Image: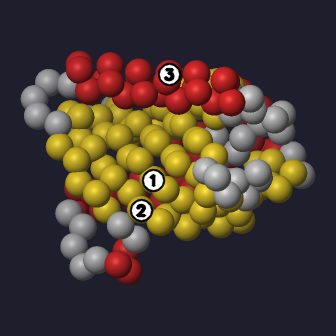
């Protein structure tokens, strides 16, 4: 869901979406057995060390971004769980809605400004990223700064995106 709806989001809807995503993340954290740890990760050129676990996690996000940029639905579908939930601009998308809307999404570029990786369990991670997007959705320019939060779960076929939330920053339309 690297795109937002072409309808103008209301502040109350955005607040509800943010609360829902926060509630989902907290519920997952509460259910996670064992310790939870987080390591902030900045832009690659700003530091010399990123753990291999975090590099692997960020590679998932990079693969999804590249699939969107290339407009490659089969690759996006391979990375997304059948129980996918996408939250943005007061809307909730499931996998079938993502597939339906995918042709309207045109991502030109995504620049990661910072990221934090949280390991909830060995098979569940949360990635929070501050990004600059250049993108159109249904022909409308929606470029700007966004806070992206994704939850990845390891399934039998490998890591799959379960939950995705985008919140527009002050610079976004």
Residue 129, which numbered label?
Answer: 1
Residue at horizontal 23%, vertical 20%?
A: 30
Q: Secondary structure at mark 1?
A: strand
Residue occupying image coordinates x 17% and y 43% = 37
> Can you say whether 47 is above or below 17 in the image?
below
Relative to residue 84, is residue 72 drawn left or right? Answer: right
| Between discs 1 and 2, the one toward the N terminus | 2
For mark 2, give the secondary structure.
strand
Q: Could you tell me how far apart the alpha carbons at marks 3 and 1 are, in whole angstroms? A: 18 Å
The earlier-in-sequence mark between 3 and 1 is: 3
- Of 62 and 36, the residue lying toward us: 36
Look at the image and tell me whether residue 26 can be seen.
Answer: yes
> Callout 2: few (<14), some (14-19), or many (20+) C-alpha neighbours within 10 Å?
some
Judged left or right of residue 111, residue 150 is left
Q: Nearer the viewer, residue 119 or 11?
A: 11
Q: Residue at x 38, y 46 (%)?
A: 127
Residue 154 shows in this picture: no
Q: Secondary structure at mark 3?
A: helix
Q: Which residue is mark 3?
A: 20
Q: Estimate how packed mark 1 is, as few (under 14), some (14 to 19) or many (20 or more) residues with alpha carbons within 10 Å.
A: many
Kindly indicate whether the residue at mark 1 contacts the one at mark 3 (C-beta within 8 angstroms). no
Image position of 128 (left or right of 147)? left
| Label placed on residue 114 | 2
Q: Nearer the viewer, residue 93 or 19?
A: 19
């Amino acid at each position: 869901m690297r795109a937002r709806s072409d309808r103008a989001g209301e502040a109350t809807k955005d607040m509800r979406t943010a609360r829902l995503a926060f509630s989902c993340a907290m519920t997952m954290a509460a259910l996670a057995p064992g310790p939870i740890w987080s390591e902030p990760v900045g832009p690659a050129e700003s530091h010399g060390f990123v753990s291999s676990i975090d590099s692997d996690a960020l590679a998932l996000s990079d693969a999804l971004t590249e699939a969107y940029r290339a407009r490659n639905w089969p690759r996006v579908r391979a990375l997304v769980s059948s129980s996918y939930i996408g939250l943005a601009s007061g809307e909730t998308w499931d996998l079938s809605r993502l597939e339906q809307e995918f042709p309207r999404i045109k991502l030109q570029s995504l620049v990661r400004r910072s990221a934090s990786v949280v390991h909830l369990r060995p098979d569940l991670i949360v990635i929070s990223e501050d990004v600059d997007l250049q993108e159109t959705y249904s022909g409308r320019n929606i470029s700007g700064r966004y806070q992206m939060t994704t939850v990845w779960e390891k399934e039998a076929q490998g890591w799959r995106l379960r939950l995705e939330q985008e919140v527009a920053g002050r610079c976004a339309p």
